[in-house]
Every structure is written in structure tokens, then in C-alpha cells.
Amino acid sequence: MEQNQTQEQPCSGRWTHQNVEMIVAVLIMLIGALMMVDSLRIGIGWASDGPQGGYFPFRTGAILCISSVVILLRALFGKKHNNRKPFVSWGSFRQVLFVLIPALLYVLVTQFTGIYVASALFIGGFMRVIGRFNWLRVILTSVIITALLFWMFEIQFMVPLPKGPLESLFGY
Amino acid sequence: MEDLLNLFHGFAIIFSWYNLGMMVVGLMLGVLVGVLPGLGGPNGVAILLPLTFTMSPTSAIVMLSCIYWGSLFAGAITSILFNIPGESHSVATTFDGYPLAQQGRAGEALTASFTGSFFGALFSVLMITFLAPLVAKFALKFGPPEFFSVYLLTFASFVGTGKDPFKTLVSLMLGFGLAQIGMDNVSGQLRLTFGWSELLRGVDFLVVVIGLFGVGEILLSMEEGLKFEGVDDKINPKVVWQTWKKLPKYWLTVIFGAVIGAWMGFKPGGATAASFMSYGLAKKISKNGDKFGTGELEGVIAPETAAHGSGCAALLPMMALGIPGSATAAVLLGGLMIWGLQPGPLLFVEQKEFVWGLIASMYLSNVVGLVIVLSTVPLFAAILRIPFSIIAPVIVVVCAIGAYTVNNAMFNIWVMLTFGVIGYIFKKLDYPLAPLILALVLGDKTEVSFRQAILGSQGDLGVFFSNWLVGAIMTAGLLLLFWPAIAAIWSKLRKRLATS
């Protein structure tokens, strides 16, 4: 709750709108530079059969670099009104992490158990922790949704999704 | 005359139980993805595209385009009942839609907006019917230089009309960069793979769309602490009938909205601009202009007519030139390529059945769509009342499955998550996302047309100004590209003149 009070004031912390703008600009510049370097390797000029493989990527990278430098300089010296505002308040960012971290775990778990078990765990866990539903509803909802997905993809559309040990128990 | 015959033939194709079924399924799914936070036109189509790989292209495009129409209709539901614009083109609908709903006139507002949408779409489809074959015939003369110039014009129009030219450029170039990953189809060299075998086949645009628009949108919704506080919807035949009786007096608003929509739909990213323009114009010409924003029916009709019209019109350049006019149209275009069709003017010659089937389905699906949305609003409003803590994980799961099925690779799900985060940050920093998608879909074709053109002229860049047609398009493209700079210099000059 403390954070909610401070977020209204212009803060001098690290994560202002301006900072994030600058970090993103630098990252984009790096991507551009990387593209240019990789293109140099395969040739950026003209061969007998027209432009070489790196002709386009090199120029794409160059435009990326130039644009991101402009964005960076503007963020540094420009006077945009929301420059000093926080990019995101801690309270809101926590909400974002509440989806992002479980989603990351979900993909990780999918690697081992297949997508169906992971989905049931993800939906159920999310309902339990964020939504504070009672266990009965949690288990019913997550199992029914996953079963529906299984029916739709494996049986109706016959699109194989990643499966793990549980599905192989049932012979899939 | 020939076109009309073709159109009748198209109707004959559409009138099969299978295609009609696909239409209804597509529309329902479209409304569903339209009302759900985090899902929308572009990623709704992207998620379902892999399921259509085995269908005939005509049935597939009927279903997917219907998802698009459904999601366009659905924008009004969330805007009016929940004051949440599902997509940027329905922002203007909230201005008068939500006040109307608060006054207990939600049914009226919904009926008016759906009907307006219907007329906007009808106008655009009529335009497509008569104009698209002409445009395609004209474009048959295009060679590689002309195509490159048209691509340039498309990309430049983002820069020229966007909010921030440099961020638009970054977005475009990132799209190009992503398109370049993998094997270069001219020289056979590996580009930008950095020895990573997963990148050999490139990054699929569907996965990027699902990440940017799906996961990114969920993260944003979470941040805003989404709570749906909806207004009750009372929509029944009586309300519909009474609203329809009122509508004829708004004919001028509808016509203006439809024309603006059709005109803006040609250009990429037009729907949002069209809805605002139409709203502004309606406010000016209406007798009750000063009451706009407090709950005027016209204020709902105007933006919805234009948005839906422009969404439909976006398919014209997609079919006739192979250049999509909106993000969703870009995904549909990608679908054409996956089904083995070559987008471009030849489509009208070689794939008559497909093209005219699609056009015929657009007439029919808008009628069916109108009936469906009018009768199912309460159902979809109920879906929105499902707690977000159930909807959010389900949407992430659906996105993950969609990304995986693109080419059965776990790697795709990781790419999707990464682009979800990128989408979230880019949205917050006002980087436009539509140019990225368009550049990603058209990147290869742009490069190939450039290379072919330059090969034909043996390295002479003059080929891009070698005749009046390509020269004019190139000049227009370059003008648009540098328009922000030109406009800035011009306004400075005028200021200096005014002071002296």
C-alpha cells in the first residue's frame, strides 16, 4: 500500500519512463549493431548476381541503429512531460509478474509433463492463488477445461500437442 | 458483367452446409476472441490458422475472415457495456456508448452500432466487388520494380501518418530483421541465425502475432487491474425494432462513416484513425454535436460504421495487390501463403473460386453476423463476467497451444513468451506494433522484388524511376517517408515568415 501513495509523485528512482525508454533504445541499437556485424560476414555489397545476402539485413540494422540513437537522444535531452513518471508502479508491476512468472513456469513444466498436465496445473494454481477459489471449483474447472482442450485437439482436429508420461499411461 | 457472374458463382460456392457452418463457427469465435481481453482479431486468426492447414483454402478463408468480422462486431460490446475498448478502433465508441449504457439504453446503443457496422461493411464489400478486379487487372502489369515501390509506399505510409516516425521505423525494421532470420532464399546463406539451429527455419509471424498481441495484451490487462464492471444489457426484438425505426434519420452519419471507413481501409492501420475521424465529423455535422460524449446514438454509429468499413476495406489491397491493410489482414495474407496460394493480382485470374467465394462470403457473413451479435450479446456479456483469474490463464494456455501448433515446436512457445514481454514494453512506450507485423509478413517479398528489379537493370537504381507509374509510386512513397521532416521544416518556415 505504501507504494501506491508514492507512485503519484514524480519519482527519482531508476525505473522512470525515461530510463526504460533509454534502456530499450540501447537494446535496439545493440540488435541493429548485431545485424550489421552478422551481415558483414556474408557480404553487404554487390556480387555478380545482384545484392549479396547481407545487403538487406545490413541496411535494416543501420536504420535500427540510427533510429534508436535518435530515440535515445530525445529521451536524454527531450522535454516530454511523462519522462519523470514511473514506468510502472510496483503495485501494478507485481500484478504483471503474477502472470509472467507462472507463465514461465508453465512453459518449463510443459517441457517435462506435456502441455495438458501443465495447463491443468497452471489454470488451477492461478485460480487458487490469485482468484482464491475453493479447491473443488479449482480442480473441476482446470480438469474440465484441459479435458475439453484434449478432446478438441487430439481427437477432433488430430493436432498432436506435447504429451508426457500421464498421457502415455492412457495410451496416447 | 463478368464480375457479377463471378460473384454469383462465389455465392454458389458459399451455399454449402460446410461453408455456412464454417461461417457461423468463425463469427461466434470472432465475437468470443473480440470480447475476451488479450485476444483479438490478429491473434485470434493466428491461433486458429494452424487448424485450417488441412481445409480447402476457400473454407479456411471463410472461417478466418468471419473471425475477423466477429471481432470487429465485438469491439462494440465491450466498449458499450464495460467501457473497455477491446481494440484501439473501438475507443471512440466508448465516448457515447458507455454513457448510453449507464442511462439504461445499452440495447439501443448496441443495436445502433451493430447496424452501423453492417452498413459500413456492406459499403466496403460493394466497393471491393467492383473495384478489386479493376485494381488487380491494373496491377497485372506490375513488374518487380512496381511491386517494390508499392511495398515502399505501404511501409512509408506508416512512417508518414504514424505518431512517432522513429519508433515506427524501429518497429518496421525489427519486422524486417525477423523476416530475414533463417536461410536467404536467393543466395542460400544463413542469415542472423548465430549458429542457433532452432532459428534455421526463421521466426514464424504467427508466433510473433500471438506473443505481441495475445500475451502482451494479457500483461497489460493485468497491470491495469482489470475489473469488469458491466452495465446490464437489455436487448430484445422490441428494442432492436424501435432502434431501427430511429436509425433512418442518421443516414448522413452512416454514409460519411462508411465512406471514411472505406477510404481509410486502403491504408495500413486505418481503422483507428477512421473511427476517430468519423466521430469527429459526425460531431461537426450533427445538430446535437455539443451533446456528444453524453450519450448520443450518432456518437456510437459514426465510429463503428467507419471502423467496420475500414476493416473490410483492408481486404481490398490484400486480395488485389497482396498488401494487407490491417494487422489482421496481414495474418490472413500469411494464411494464403501457407495454403499454397500466391497473393497478388494473379489471384483474380488463377484462383477465381477462392477470391469470389471470399467476396460472396463477406456479403453473407455480415448479414449472418448482424443476426448473431444481436441475438447473443447477453451470452457474450456473461462470458466477460467470468473472473479474470480464470480467463487469464486459459488465454495464456490457448496462446501457447496456438504457438506450438504453427510447426509443432516447443521453441515457438518460448518465442511467444519473449514477444509477449516485448509487446508489453512496446505498448507502454508507444512503439506501434502493426508495422512490425506487416514488415514481418511482407519482408521477404519486399526483398525479393527489390533484388529482381535490380537484377533486371543490372544494378542500376534508376529502374525505380524508369517509367511514370513506378516513378510516381516511388515519389509518393519517398514523400510519405520523409513527410514528418517535410512537415516540420514547412511549419518552421511559415513561422519565420509570419514573424518577419
Image: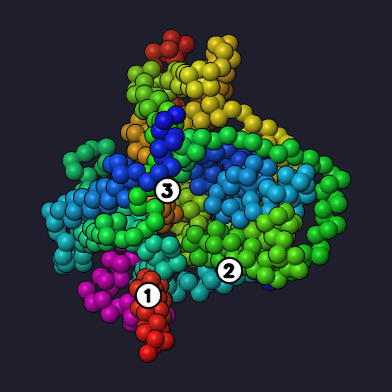
Return the disc, 3 or 2, that comes first in the chain's sequence: 2
Q: Is residue A53 above or below residue B66?
A: below
Nearer-the-camera pick, A162 or B493: B493
Find residue B53 and report its horizontal and vertical position in percent.
49, 41
Find residue B227 and report its horizontal and vertical position in percent.
58, 34
Return the disc, 3 or 1, that comes first in the chain's sequence: 3
Dot 1 amino acid type: Ala
Secondary element at tag 1: helix
- Report the residue at 32% width, 50% height from top: A18
Chain at tag 1:
B
Q: Tag 3: Cα neighbours inside 10 Å, few (<14), some, or many (≥20)?
A: some
Answer yes or no: is residue B310 visible: no
Q: Is residue A14 above or below residue B265?
A: above
Find residue B471 and report its horizontal and vertical position in percent.
37, 80
Nearer-the-camera pick, B238 or B51: B238
Query: Real-space Cα distance between discs 3 and 2?
Result: 27 Å
For label 1, the residue is B488
Furthest residue in direction bottom, as rendered: B500
In the rendered structure, find residue B427 and report the number of the disc placed on it. Answer: 3
Q: Tag 1: Cα neighbours inside 10 Å, few (<14), some, or many (≥20)?
A: few
In the rendered structure, find residue B263 and report the number of the disc placed on it. Answer: 2
- Report the residue at 64% width, 54% height from top: B95
Query: Real-space Cα distance between discs 3 and 1?
Result: 26 Å
Secondary element at tag 2: helix
- Report the residue at 55% width, 11% height from top: A135
